[in-house]
Amino acid sequence: MMTLDEYQKSALETYIGPLGRGRFIYGTMKLAGEAGEFNEKVGKIIRKRDLGFELTPEERAALAAELGDILWYVAMVADYLGYSLQDIAVANQVKLASRQARGVLEGSGDNR
C-alpha cells in the first residue's frame, strides 16, 4: 500500500510544466478545472436520473479517475507550499476533530 507521502513523491516525478511561481498558478488553475470536471460528471448523472440515482460501476470509475486527477494537483500545490499530503491530511483531521469537540461542525466560516 502507498502512503500519501509516497504518492506525492511519485506524482512529483511526473510533473511537467512551469517552474517556480508558475507551478503554483498552473497547479491551482488545473486543480479548479479538475474539480469542475468532477462536478460536470455528477451534474450529467443528475440530469439523466434526477436526485434518486444510483451510480453505475462505469460512473464510479469515471468519478474515481477525476478524483485521482484532483489528488495529483493537490499534491503539486501542497509541495509548492512546502507541505506534504500527510501534513495536509493530519492538519485537516485535527481541525475537524476540534470543530466536532466544540460542536461547530455544522457552522460556517474558516475560523470556527
Image: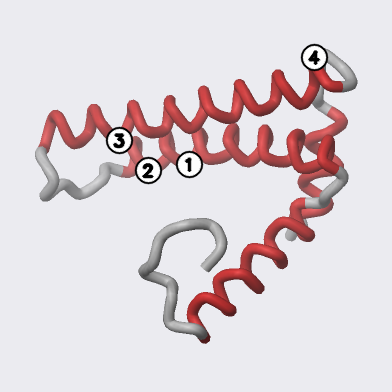
Residue tagged 4: 17
* Quadrant of the rendered image containing residue 60: top left
* Quadrant of the rendered image containing residue 104: bottom left
Q: CA distance from mark 1 to mark 2?
A: 6 Å
Mark toward the start of the polypeptide (3 vs 4): 4
Measured from the top left, where is residue 95 in percent x and y?
A: 61, 69
Residue at (11, 37) in percent of width and height: 49
| Residue type indicated by callout 2 | Arg
Q: Nearer the viewer, mark 3 or mark 1?
A: 3
Mark toward the start of the polypeptide (3 vs 1): 3
Residue at (77, 59) in percent of width and height: 86
Mark toward the start of the polypeptide (2 vs 4): 4
Colour scheme: secondary structure
Of residues 66 and 108, which is closer to you in this image? Answer: 108
Q: Nearer the viewer, mark 4 or mark 1?
A: 4
Q: Are marks 4 and 1 in contact (CB under 8 Å)?
A: no
Are there few (<14), some (14-19), or many (20+) residues within 10 Å of tag 2? Answer: few
Query: Relative to 69, is 3 above or below?
Result: below
In the picture, the disc for residue 64 is 1
Are there few (<14), some (14-19), or many (20+) residues within 10 Å of tag 4? Answer: few
| Residue type indicated by callout 4 | Gly
Residue at (55, 71) in percent of width and height: 96
Q: CA distance from mark 4 to mark 1?
A: 24 Å
The quarter of the picture where the N terminus appears is bottom right
Residue at (80, 22) in percent of width and height: 23
Residue tagged 2: 60
Residue tagged 3: 42
| Residue type indicated by callout 3 | Val
Secondary structure, mark 1, is: helix
